[in-house]
Amino acid sequence: MPEQPQTRRGAATYQRILDAATEEFAQYGISGARVDRIVTAAQTNKAQLYAYFGNKGQLFDAIFLDSLESITNVAPIDADDLADWAVRLYDEYLRRPDLIRLATWTRLERRPTGHLTNTPRDHDEHKLAGIAEAQAAGRVRAGEPFDIMAMVIAMSMAWSPVSNVYAADAHESEETHESRRALLRDCVTTAMAPQ
């Protein structure tokens, strides 16, 4: 991520740009986002945006990488309870649907195949090591740890903003969300149980 400004006023402008750009990119994608709308919403100008981020693509990259960190930190993996992790991811998608949309735009516009990022992420290594350890202890089914992680994440996204069937909304009844959480928990538990 670009270096943050040192003054309080600069930091406030920087954060307004990030907030406005997150909304813009989540709604319109990389190609559809407009710098004019971002700077208007952020109450700044293009020169300031470019001074902080370089260009629109670099601004998107900064926001996208930060969004990955947000989800990782809010819902850290517990390889001994992958079902609980899936449910916490479900809740995070309800709370921050914009983060999932950013990942989807990345997949659609930048990386249609392979990993979502082109740089190794330390938090994935931690997840994979945790899954491998749980597998070695007989608590999680055998298989490639990356594929286990990918499957749990995919299951957690069943009702996310990128669902091909139904995108959940945080304003739906708590009873509805609890029913989905219970189903998700049961499905992940069954799918990831040692065989």
Image (cartoon, helix red, strand yellow):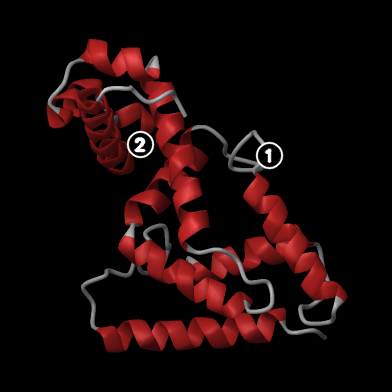
Residue 10 in which image quadrant: top left
- Residue 158 seen anywhere in this rendered image of the structure: no
Would residue 95 be found to the left or right of residue 108 on screen?
left
Tally the marks. Answer: 2
- Report the front residue among 78 and 101: 78
- Helix, strand, or loop for circle 1? loop
Sort mark 1 into few (<14), some (14-19) or many (20+) by Cα contacts within 10 Å.
few
Query: Percent position (x, y) of residue 39?
Result: 19, 24
Q: Are marks 1 and 2 in contact (CB under 8 Å)?
A: no
User: Left of 97 or right of it: where is 143?
Assistant: right
| Residue at numbered disc 1 | 120
x then y, percent, for residue 97: 34, 57
| Structural crowding at the residue carrying mark 2, measured as other residues with C-alpha within 10 Å and reported as few (<14), some (14–19) or many (≥20) | many
Kind of residue sitting beneath label 2 = Gly
Quadrant for the C terminus, please: bottom right
Q: Residue at 26% of width from left, 23% of height from top?
A: 7
Residue 29 disc label: 2
Three-letter residue code for mark 1: Pro
Relative image position of residue 190 (x, y in whole percent): 66, 86
